[in-house]
Image (cartoon, helix red, strand yellow):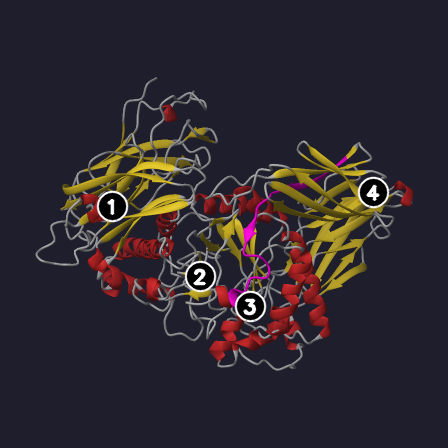
Amino acid sequence: MPRWPEHAGLEVARLDGFVADGPPGDERDCVFTLEFSAVAAGADEEVALAFDGIATEFEVVLNGVGIATGSSMFAAFEVDVGAVLRDGANVLEIRCRALRDVLAEAPRRPRQRWRTKVVADGALRFVRTAVIGRAPGFAAGPPIVGPWRPVWLVRRRGVAVQDVALRPRLEGDEGVLDVRLALRAVGGAGDGALPRRVEVVVGAHRCALAVGADGTVAGELRLPGVERWWPHTHGAPVLHDVTLVLDGERAVALGRTGFRALTPGPDHDVDRDGLALAVNGVPVFARGAVWTPVAEGALRATLTTMRDGGMNLVRVAGIGVYEDAAFHDLCDELGLLVWQDFMFANLDYPIADAGFRAAVEAEARAALAEVAGRPSLAVLCGNSEVEQQAAMFGVDPALGRGELFGELLPRLARESGADVPYVPSAPCGGALPFHPGSGVANYFGVGGYRRPLDDARRAEVRFASECLAFANLPDGPVADGEGVMRDVGADWDFADVRDHYLREVYGIDAAALRDGDRERYLALGRQVTGEVMAATFGEWRRAASPTAGAIVLWLRDVAPGAGWGVLDHRGAPKVAFAHLRRALAPRAVWIVDEGLNGLDVHVANDGPGPLVAELHVALLAGGAHTIAEGATALTIPPHATACHNAEGLLGHFADASCAYRFGPPAHDTVVATLRTTDGTPLAQATHFPTGPPLQPTTFTLTAIVKAPDPFLQPHCEKGDSPHPPTLWGQSPPRDVLGTVPTPRRFGDSPQVVVALATERVAWGVRISAPGFVPVDDAFDLVPGGERLVALRPVGNAVWAGGAVTALNLIGEAPIARADVRD
């Protein structure tokens, strides 16, 4: 629902431009000052200041008068300022105490039953503020201080609409919308100003709501045959506008809602049964990443990139902050499921303290009011790593659950009407909460614990609430250690983890390569973490896998360098993201080495329509010559997968996995291509049974701007091209991965299409063009046809050429310009 329900009696202005008296931080008191002009409150109106969040212990002063104090960055509040607001110039001050001093005054009882190195000062457990920005191993700073969320000047006249709660549900094919809210007479208006007739309208459907004498409004609207909301990977995230009508004429926009059935529900036992989500009766392989806060202007772009990367779930983790209505509105719109933590992590919280308990209860009720009833909400979670921290400290992990996470928060979740499963702690379940085979797991076997790749199967992960943390290298120069995370006290960091897999997967001495050829070291470092992540998801996405979902740690870096993010700190995709994008696509093909059982080729069809296609497999010698091939027709129902053995498609034994080794391998490359019945490619996977082509050589790789082409014609408008090209990696349309029905323009400049061809397999192909970003990246190019890749301009960039590289190609191939029609 919107931050402010829109109607004629409401006027809202955002107050921007606070000036700090110095660099904000935890070591000093900080004052934030704003001068603004306003009109004094009228006799018939109510004027308030609304604060969406101030970190952390603060006093608010308006025109020299103290109007509010607080001690939680998560508490939004509103103050009537009608008596203080001046006509003309006003001065608003927010005075924040140094968190250092607040922590120094924190009580020492109750004593911590376990300790953590995630934060430097355990007294943080008494203060309701964010861990992120205060975690020396992964997010050391700067901390969030001051007015970190908007401040609003709010004027109300006539009737105020507040406490809106929309709770949609499905009963068979019928949608049922439960509506509850409160109406309040404002200013000089008496109770007689309250409307006598209130209706709720959704599309062509409307019904009257009951209005109580105290202004409470309640009722249900039924919508026969309602269109359902789906995560974007499985269908359309259909939303419906909801409007409140007062006395038949005054309309109040209550936002949008969606109808979906989600299982399991609130009474699910995650410890015993793990977690496997189903939407509208369809099991969903949930895949996504942990969210980190981004600048307001980057919100839509970041979530859209996430969606276009094939991810369908975002976790708002307990180390961070509660996100606002704009975030959740976008998740509803984009079809992204939300795993919502309460903001608790690792610490032993003093729930027995009455003041702390009251603050937590108010915080949780406010957070639940924002997310309950949203179609995107999929999981509520009590905390991040509290039970794990207790267990690793050597005490009973049940102490980490206690009353706060085992009773209070799940009770408040049920009372809010949230229809989703509650996870007490991530991870939890099993003999120890960090054992990955039970409950939900933070799985870093492949990753931080440097286990071999087959551990992803051996661990029998049921749901990974965090996984696959690597020091993912961004493009461009990176200093050693820049942005790299480290577990406090460990003698290794996540760059060491990346170097381990350079040895494990490629057989490379990372230190020697870094010293001898730094650019090569960075290029292979970018590639290896992406390949390892994609291979792990390939294991988990198999139909025979017990894994129902996995969440990468994390989506976007909070600082420059090689952080955990698959997007860099600016939001640009890293090479790791490109590999995940193909592995997680709604329609995808991938190859899994089953040893003596050969190679299995898996195909996923997550979408709402059947997939009628052909699966083709080829074995290549020298990366160039086809020595065996086979194909089969496929018809895969909606929301389903298929698996075919490569040698079953070939029709004969070929030692496709190079496991039997009766002689020198006859082939070095296996290519699986999913294509339509008319030959249009939909997805492709490559497998190198004897290892990738690490040694750069000289071979012919051509790159040509496709022309004549409507994408390059300045006058071309949407719909002009009757025969569009096939574009590898292009996201839209959602129903046929890889094809674009009409030319697409971005700003004033159309995207450019480059045709690539090679005489032998090109490994890790990258396209570089100033001002343009390729839709697909770091892919393998195989001989025998051309591959068309779209490049989207940044802003109004003008095409000025570019080049193509591959990890096994000496030099680069310039992008040639073909003749273009005038």
Distance in Å between CA atoms under marks 1 and 2: 33 Å
Q: Is residue 396 above or below residue 479?
A: below
Mark 4 crowd level (few <14, some 14–19, many ≥20, 10 Å Cα): many
Q: Is residue 814 above or below residue 332?
A: above
Distance in Å between CA atoms under marks 2 and 4: 48 Å
x then y, percent, for residue 427 = 49, 67
**Total marks drawn?**
4
* The label number, if any, that marks residue 806 in the structure image: 1
Quarter location, residue 491 = bottom left
Residue found 90% across the figure and 45% down from its top:
191
**Labelled pair 4, 3 in contact (Cβ < 8 Å):** no
Q: Mark 2 belongs to which amino acid?
A: Ala
x then y, percent, for residue 284 = 46, 50
Q: Which residue, given by chain and number where applicable, does mark 3 sit on?
A: 345
Extent of the magenta region: 251-271
Dot 3: element: loop
Look at the image and tell me in which quarter the N terminus lies: top right
Is tag 1's residue or tag 4's residue first in the polypeptide sequence?
Answer: 4
Q: Mark 4 belongs to which amino acid?
A: Val
Q: Which residue, given by chain and number where applicable, does mark 2 sit on?
A: 464
Is tag 3's residue or tag 1's residue first in the polypeptide sequence?
Answer: 3
Distance in Å between CA atoms under marks 4 and 3: 41 Å
x then y, percent, for residue 62 = 78, 55
Q: Which residue, given by chain and number where applicable, does mark 4 sit on?
A: 159
Q: Is residue 130 above or below residue 644?
A: below
Q: Is residue 74 visible?
A: no
Residue found 41% across the figure and 57% down from its top:
561
